[in-house]
């Protein structure tokens, strides 16, 4: 098993990790590429992003994705990433509720609250296939990320986690993330670096 900087040819496999680890609990169908358009693609392409993948004998089995400066990242996504996707995925089109939820995010992206970004300008996403979970890999990858960002002088990092993902919330808490705020669907957590 190895961990390395992500390459563009990792995109399909990283999208698959995102899709399969993010499937809706209620089993409702979701198109395989939609979630990755929001949570993976830009982090392998945008300037200022830091993307690491974990590779084992079965291929890419996980990633840790980070935008060093959330506001610049949001602006790049708005200008370069979303316009074409909005044309291909119009809001008004019959599709499953799970797909509609993501298409709405393409048209109205989640913008991190100013109170979060002010102290914690970077943000991250991590997902590992089940075969790579529970072996300390997530903690190690995030520890390395903290060290890199701190060396670069970035003061803090935040993330959003589903309110129902109690295991992940506990996991982040152990790594020093504290809850900053929450809404009906997500908890924002931050950690100083
Ligand atoms: C959450 C995740 C990144 C954690 O990475 P990991 O490599 O499995 O975590 P580690 O092995 O470093 O675990 C550290 C600790 O957190 C616990 N933990 C991690 N994820 C957990 C979960 N989902 N439920 C319960 N406990 C969890 C581990 O049991 C471990 O506890 P221990 O040190 O007392 O044994 C990984 O499990 C994952 O990708 N899960 C599925 C997708 C997901 O939920 N992503 C986060 C979306 S915000």
Image (spheres, rainbow, N blue to C red):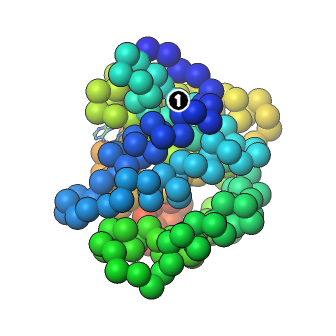
Q: Residue 61: where, in percent of width, then height?
A: 40, 30
Q: Residue at x 34, y 80 (%)?
A: 94
The front one of 134 and 74 is 74
Q: Residue furthest front?
A: 88
Drawn side of residue 21 relative to residue 183, left or right: left
Q: Residue at x 51, y 78 (%)?
A: 90
Quarter containing the N terminus: top left
The front one of 3 and 122 is 3
Q: Residue furthest left?
A: 26
Q: Residue at x 32, y 46 (%)?
A: 20
Drawn side of residue 182 relative to residue 43, left or right: left
Question: Which quadrant of the render holds ligand 1?
Answer: top left
Q: Residue 60: where, in percent of width, then height?
A: 44, 28
Drawn side of residue 33 relative to residue 122, left or right: left
> Which element type, helix, strand or loop, lies under badge 1?
strand
- Residue of label 1: 53
The front one of 58 and 132 is 58
The front one of 131 and 167 is 131
Look at the numbered disc 1 and say if its residue's Cβ is closer than 8 Å to ligand 1. no
Q: Residue 135: where, in percent of width, then height?
A: 34, 22
Residue 35 position (above or below residue 154): below
């Amino acid at each position: 098993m190895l961990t390395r900087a992500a390459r563009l040819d990792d995109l399909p496999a990283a999208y698959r990790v995102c899709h399969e680890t993010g499937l809706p609990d209620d089993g409702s169908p979701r198109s395989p590429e939609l979630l990755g358009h929001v949570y993976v693609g830009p982090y392998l392409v945008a300037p200022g992003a830091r993307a690491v993948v974990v590779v084992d004998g079965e291929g890419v089995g996980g990633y840790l994705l980070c935008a060093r400066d959330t506001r610049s990242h949001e602006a790049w996504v708005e200008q370069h990433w979303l316009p074409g996707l909005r044309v291909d995925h119009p809001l008004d089109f019959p599709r499953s509720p799970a797909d509609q939820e993501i298409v709405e995010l393409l048209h109205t992206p989640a913008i991190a609250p100013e109170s979060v970004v002010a102290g914690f300008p970077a943000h991250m996403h991590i997902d590992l296939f089940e075969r790579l979970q529970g072996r300390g890999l997530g903690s190690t990858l995030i520890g390395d990320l903290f060290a890199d960002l701190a060396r670069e002088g970035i003061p803090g990092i935040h993330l959003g986690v589903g309110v129902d993902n109690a295991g992940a919330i506990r996991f982040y808490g152990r790594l020093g993330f504290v809850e900053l705020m929450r809404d009906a669907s997500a908890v924002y957590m931050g950690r100083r670096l």
